[in-house]
Image (tube, helix red, strand yellow):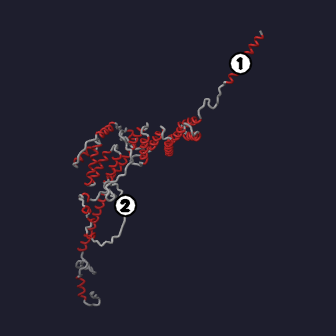
């Protein structure tokens, strides 16, 4: 009985030993590094994101720079670079925005094909859009915003930021057009007609979606009319554009009347332009009383009248020259291309010919039209208008008044000298003084009576 119990115990020990040996041979190896932990680059990135959310931007940038310098092949490299730019953007301020723009530009340079590249360009557009001043102030940031938003539409036309950028671009161009209108309206009010017509006409050509384009064209037409009859065609074109392209503007009726008075054809409204203006009128939201009362505190421009539809302008503004400025003819002799790429070399040689035909001929400088063999209308002989016509007219009137005043004073003095009797040395009255150059009868008489006395003066031979 005891023997059996001992055998059973030994067998149990053997089984237990075999089990323990088997368990030791197939035990799973566990490392403390991977147990309940993440990759170190992800840890740094998550920590930096958490610091950005809490406003610890400098600490976040240190973590992100450590990630980018240590783990160059990390999958979080691009996200870390974008997060650095976002940290500067959230920090704000002039320095923060400048650093953010530089970081976003670097991100687009290194990762142009990533989806986040469009987001980076959109942030650059937002930076300058928020810094815009009013239309009558410095427009540096407005021009930068226009450039960056157009860049977004050109590089990433299919991104989710494109519709927002297009509307933002329409708002920007509304401010730019208003700036140009303020300048052109100033010229128009001060009768600087060539500058006003050039500025207002170019304004509508560059920004056709401008909400006050009808008024700009009407003032341009009036400026052309004031410049003389030779610019009648340009004035008619301005009025016709109002009727055709801006039929619902406040100046449409006045433009029709002007065309009728000028006996020019009145065009029909463009259906597409009419539908666009109806859409803009239906979707216009007037600013609330609170918004208008607090407008003086807002540094940005008023873009409530900006267009809601239509393609914004994608070209840079072109430099224009007023029509009153003569165009230089630089074309080569016999060239009809009109490209202006003529010969600009100047040579001079001495003429030794004895032919006097040139001296006996008529001087063509006195009559250029007849010498050229062309019939120049009378209007072309008139001087071209300038931006100082009003000032020159006022100056000439002042000079004419001064000259008339001087002549009147001179005549008055001459009359006074003729009417005032001359007095002799003893105070006695004598005959009026004779004009210069005439013989003096009193002097002759005195000479005749004095004879050849001691005090007499002999006559000059």
Q: Residues within 10 Å of mark 2 (few under 14, many from 20)?
A: few
Q: Earlier in the sequence, mark 1 or mark 2?
A: 1
Question: In front here: 422 or 44?
Answer: 44
Asked whether, in this view, residue 79 is left or right of residue 286, the answer is right
Q: Residue drawn at (21%, 48%), measured in percent from left and top?
A: 263
Quadrant where the C terminus is found in the figure: bottom left
**Residue where numbered disc 2 is placed:** 344
Residue 242, position as x, y percentages in the image: 28, 45
Q: Callout 2: helix, strand or loop? A: loop
Tell me where residue 393 sits by quadrant: bottom left
Q: Callout 1: helix, strand or loop? A: helix
**Residue where numbered disc 1 is placed:** 16
User: Can the viewer see residue 297?
Assistant: no
Q: Residues within 10 Å of mark 1 (few under 14, many from 20)?
A: few
Quadrant where the N terminus is found in the figure: top right
Q: Is residue 221 above or below residue 343?
A: above
Question: In front here: 147 or 306?
Answer: 147
Question: In front here: 169 or 389?
Answer: 169
Residue 97, position as x, y percentages in the image: 49, 44
């Amino acid at each position: 009985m005891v023997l059996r119990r001992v055998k059973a115990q030994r067998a149990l020990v053997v089984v237990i030993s075999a089990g323990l040996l088997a368990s030791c041979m197939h035990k799973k190896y566990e490392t403390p590094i991977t147990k309940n932990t993440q990759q170190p680059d992800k840890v740094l990135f998550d920590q930096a994101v958490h610091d950005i959310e809490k406003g610890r931007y400098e600490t976040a940038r240190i973590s992100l720079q450590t990630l980018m310098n240590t783990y160059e092949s990390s999958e979080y490299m691009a996200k870390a670079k974008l997060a650095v730019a976002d940290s500067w953007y959230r920090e704000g301020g002039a320095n923060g925005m400048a650093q953010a723009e530089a970081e976003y530009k670097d991100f687009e340079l290194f990762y142009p094909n990533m989806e986040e590249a469009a987001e980076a360009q959109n942030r650059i557009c937002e930076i300058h859009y928020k810094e815009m001043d009013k239309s009558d102030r410095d427009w540096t940031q407005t021009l930068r915003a226009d450039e960056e938003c157009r860049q977004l539409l050109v590089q990433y036309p299919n991104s989710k930021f494109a519709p927002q950028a297009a509307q933002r671009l329409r708002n920007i161009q509304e401010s730019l057009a208003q700036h140009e209108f303020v300048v052109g309206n100033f010229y128009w009010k001060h009768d600087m007609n060539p500058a006003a017509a050039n500025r207002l006409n170019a304004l509508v050509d560059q920004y056709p979606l401008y909400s006050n384009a009808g008024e700009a064209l009407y003032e341009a037409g009036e400026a052309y009319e004031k410049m003389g009859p030779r610019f009648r065609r340009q004035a008619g074109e301005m009025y016709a554009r109002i009727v055709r392209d801006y039929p619902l503007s406040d100046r449409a009726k006045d433009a029709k009347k002007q065309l009728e008075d000028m006996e020019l054809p009145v065009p029909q409204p463009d259906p597409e332009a009419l539908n666009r203006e109806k859409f803009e009128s239906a979707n216009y939201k007037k600013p609330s009383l609170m918004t208008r009362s607090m407008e003086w505190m807002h540094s940005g421009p008023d873009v409530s009248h900006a267009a809601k539809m239509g393609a914004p302008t994608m070209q840079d503004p072109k430099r224009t020259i007023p029509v009153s400025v003569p165009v230089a003819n630089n074309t080569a002799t016999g060239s009809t291309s009109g490209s202006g790429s003529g010969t600009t070399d100047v040579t001079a040689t001495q003429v030794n010919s004895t032919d006097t035909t040139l001296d006996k001929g008529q001087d063509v400088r006195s009559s250029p039209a007849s010498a050229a063999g062309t019939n120049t209308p009378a209007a072309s002989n008139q001087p071209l208008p300038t931006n100082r016509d009003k000032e020159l007219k006022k100056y000439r009137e002042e000079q004419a008044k001064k000259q008339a005043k001087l002549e009147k004073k001179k005549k008055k003095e001459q009359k006074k000298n003729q009417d005032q009797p001359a007095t002799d040395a003893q105070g006695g009255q004598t005959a009026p003084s004779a004009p210069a150059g005439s013989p003096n009868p009193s002097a002759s008489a005195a000479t005749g009576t004095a004879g050849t006395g001691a005090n007499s003066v002999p006559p000059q031979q």
